[in-house]
Structure formats: structure tokens, C-alpha cells
Image: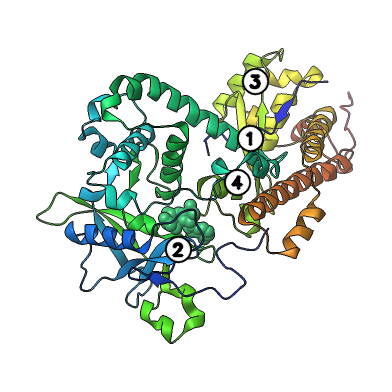
Amino acid sequence: MASLFIHSSFLSSPKPSIPIISSPTKKPPPPQILHTTVPLAGKTNPAPSTTLQTFWDWLSNKGVVSPKSPSVKPGIVPEGLGLISQKIFSRNEVVVEVPSKVWINSDTVAASEIGGLCGGLKPWASIALFLLREKGREDSPWRSYIEIMPSGNDSTIFWSEEELSELQGTQLLGTTVGVKEYVQSEFLKIEEEIILPNKHMFPTITLDDFLWAFAMLRSRAFSNLRGQNLVLIPLADLINHSPGITIDDPSWEIKGGGLFSRELKFSLRTPIPVKAGDQVKLLYSLWISLQVLIQYDMEKSNAGLALDYGFIESRSDRNVYTLTLEIPESDPFFGDKLDIAEANGFQETAYFDIILGRPLPQGLLPYLRLVALEGPDAFLLESIFRNSIWGHLELPISRTNEELICQVVRDACKTALSNYHTTIEEDEKLMQQGNLDPKLEIAVGVRAGEKKVLEQIDGIFKERELELDVLEYYQERRLKDLGLVGEQGEIIFWEPK
Ligand SMILES: C[S@@+](CC[C@H](N)C(=O)[O-])C[C@H]1O[C@@H](n2cnc3c(N)ncnc32)[C@H](O)[C@@H]1O
């Protein structure tokens, strides 16, 4: 049997059907704005309203908001803090514009006292270190901003061992463990090379602190402002996500500061119309429309949402399972197969995100057939076929090859399914019961979603197995092309005259 290697490892980036967390079934309290003394709901140790007022004053002093006629204000909402409308917004209207003088990015770090120490660090690591240093300084100019950040969220990186055990068998568990290990290894390097040799510049920073800073960056950075462009935008980063908004375009842009200014501005728009906050008294039941909300990222899987933000959605196409395929080095045709994969945009290892309810992703079947190619089919790997091979691999090559890919994929699905400690039915029962703890709700939703995708994949290849006798394979297609197969599929022999 060919050594076709499939495993269920997690997505390459530390990346990524349940009731929606942000739409509680109970009638929620109306949002509270600034001056209230009501404790903040939902998130871990959220900022008290005095802290919120200090933040507002800081924004006013910096000229970011106009305190007399603000269009939005930070307020207390079920998701922690959020942006509450102070006027009626129409669709696509600018909600707030935040000038770059209050952003925190690599430039902010470079211009700071620790800039010289952070030159070799990745942007996220240098900003994390900056945040923690400023958090520890009594007189930090960033204090008012950092203090409104929550002490945590429901991201799986904060889950206890017991909570993580609910994710048994899931790819999300693997990703979470991988991300935590990655953050830890970065922390240990930074601790040794920067923190300990410069103790006078840093407060005591633990791995947990570093993980907190990492989580703040993952949850607060806008999805296309990551990597090298990673930036924290105070005020704008209070915007919460609405699963009901399914507009794909980002609701923000970076603009030039205007004719007389070189300063950039982060401009946040509302993707949907919003009512004014004071309508809450008149229209209590429409409280949710008072908060300005956006869609964080239409492309993220539930696992990605759980890891980055600590919530998931009920939309079925948020359920994703990543199949990882590999051309093993031990394959006698390793070199040729790798050449072909690379010529067609793939590598030795390829990741395919399978989405619930969607067809198999492009490239999966050809890649599978390539990896499984062996024996009499291996002639297709010869260099004369190099330009046409991918086209051939798009269609079944031989019964043996097609049977092998079906078997291997189905076996991989069965193995993966046997690793979960619950069935889909058990998960659905739990969801129907309702009132789950938010983290358990995430765990149950993700594990049910992954299993559904695995069953979908198994189903597709099971159906294929049943068609093995009627599929058309390479040799038949070739004979047809040469005009050597008749209408009924019979071989037409050349008869000498
Ligand atoms: C960009 S911050 C938004 C501000 C945040 N609510 C706060 O209190 O600082 C993203 C975080 O807000 C929370 N959040 C945003 N939208 C949410 C939603 N629809 N459901 C649950 N939590 C949400 C999550 O904790 C997420 O990690």
C-alpha cells in the first residue's frame, strides 16, 4: 500500500452550530454608558466606570473625541465594553476616527525607551513587551488606555486543564496547545535576552503576563492589521462583533490625515444603520441596535474565533476541519511528486480547509491522487507528462489509485472521529438543554462542528467508493481521445485490410 500520509494537525498559523453567545435568550440589561456605577457584565475583571471615565478624558485631552458632541461613547455591554451610539448612524457612516498619535505599533515601541532593545523582535512580541512595561509603570502615558483592557477573555489560551479536556480530540485543542508553546518559547527567549539583563527597565513579567499581552493583541487587532502591520487602535478596539452582520468588506480604513497633516487616521464605519443610544429609554427591546457592531472576519473558522476572541458562531460554514496531507520523504517518487506539487502551487505538506456544507477545496483530489500514485500509474510522473500531469490528476487516474485515496481518507476520518469523547448527538443534546457555561458552549460547538465536517468528508469518499466501478479512469480517457473507444465503451481494434 502506498504511504499516503494524512493527519489532523492544526492550521499553519497560530491561527484556525450553537446558539450565538452575543444574542442571549434572556432579555439583557440596556447598555450602560460612562457615568454609571453598574458593574460590567460578561468579561473577566472588566474596567470599572471610573476607569472608563479616565479613558474618555484621556481621549478628549488627546483630541481624539469631542466630549461635547461625541458620536459614540465607550459603554458597558454584555460583551464587556463596547461602543454605544450617541446619534443615529446610517449605513457606512464614519463612527470614529482615531489619529495615529494614539496608536501603538512597532514605531511606537521603536520610539520608546525600550526601542533599542526590541529591534530584533517580531512586531507582536515587541508590542507585547511594550504593553507590559507600560502596564507596570505608575506614570505611563498609556495607563488610561491599558487599564480599560480586560484581565482576560474566553479565548482557549486562558482555559484551565479541566476546561480544555472538553476539547478532547479537536484540532482546536492542538492549536491552543501549539500557540501556548509558541508564546512560551518566545517569552523564554525575551526573558533571557531582554528582560533579565535590563531589570531596571521592566517590572516583573511572568509567562502569564506575556500570554495576556498576546491575547490582547490577538483579540483587539483588526484582522487585516496584523503581522508586520500590527497595531492597537484605542477606542476603535472597543468595537464588538455581530454574527448578524455578514458583510465581507472591512468596516475600517487607514486614511491620510488631510491637507495640512501627515498624520494617519484609522477610520471606523458602521456596516449597518444604528439608532441613537438615548432611544434605549423609549425602545428597551431594541437595545442591541444601540451598540455599534461590525463583522470581525467572515473567513475565520469557529476554532479561529474561539482562539482569538473567545466566542463562536452558529453559522454552519464556520465549522472547518483542516486536512493535512504530506508527500513522505520515504516515497520512492518523492522528488518527482514534490516537483509536480510545487509546480502547481503546493508544498511537501499541504493544508486543506474543509468547510461544512461546502464542496471539497480545489486541489485536494489532485494532491491526494499525486501522493497515492504508485505501481503501474507511476509512469505519469515521468518528465514528459510534467506540463499535463495536474490536469490528469484532476480526474480519476486508476481504480487502484482512487480506491486508495478513498480508503486512506475514510480511515483518517474514522481515527479522528474516535478521538472525541462525545458523539454529535450528545453534543446537540447539551446545546438544546441550553444554559451552558460560555466556555463549555464553545467547546461543545467546536467539537460538534469538527465531527460534522469529518462525517461530511467520510460521506463524500464513501460515495466515491461506491462509484469506483463506473468512474472513468486515465487509460479509458486516453483511448477515447485517440478514437479507440466506441459509443458503448468497447475497444475498437484496428483491423488490417
Ligand atoms: C476587540 S475586543 C472588543 C472590546 C471588548 N468587548 C472589551 O471589553 O474590551 C474583542 C473582545 O470582545 C469580546 N466580544 C466581542 N464581540 C463579541 C461577541 N459577539 N460575543 C462575545 N464576546 C464578544 C470578546 O471578549 C473579544 O475577545
Structural distance between the alpha carbons of marks 1 and 3:
29 Å
What number is the disc on residue 337?
A: 3
What number is the disc on residue 303?
A: 4
Structural distance between the alpha carbons of marks 2 and 4:
27 Å
Instruction: Specify which label sits upstream in the sequence, 1 or 4.
Output: 1
Q: Is residue 377 above or below residue 239?
A: above
- Residue pointed to by mark 2: 40
- Residue pointed to by mark 1: 174
Q: What residue is shown at x 67% (from left), y 29% (from top)?
A: 325
**Residue 279 falls in image quadrant:** bottom left
**Could you tell me which secondary element the residue under label 1 belongs to?**
helix
**Could you tell me which secondary element the residue under label 4 belongs to?**
helix
Q: Amino acid at mark 2?
A: Leu
Left or right position of 213 against 138: right
Asked if the residue at tag 2 contacts the one at tag 1, i.e. Cβ–Cβ closer than 8 Å, the answer is no
Image color mode? rainbow
- Identify the image quadrant of the C terminus: top right
* Residue farthest left in this picture: 260
Q: Is residue 395 above or below residue 297?
A: above
- Identify the image quadrant of the N terminus: top right
Q: Nearer the viewer, residue 155 or 366?
A: 155
Instruction: Specify which label sits upstream in the sequence, 1 or 3.
Output: 1
Establish whether ligand 1 lies closer than 8 Å to the Cβ of label 2: yes
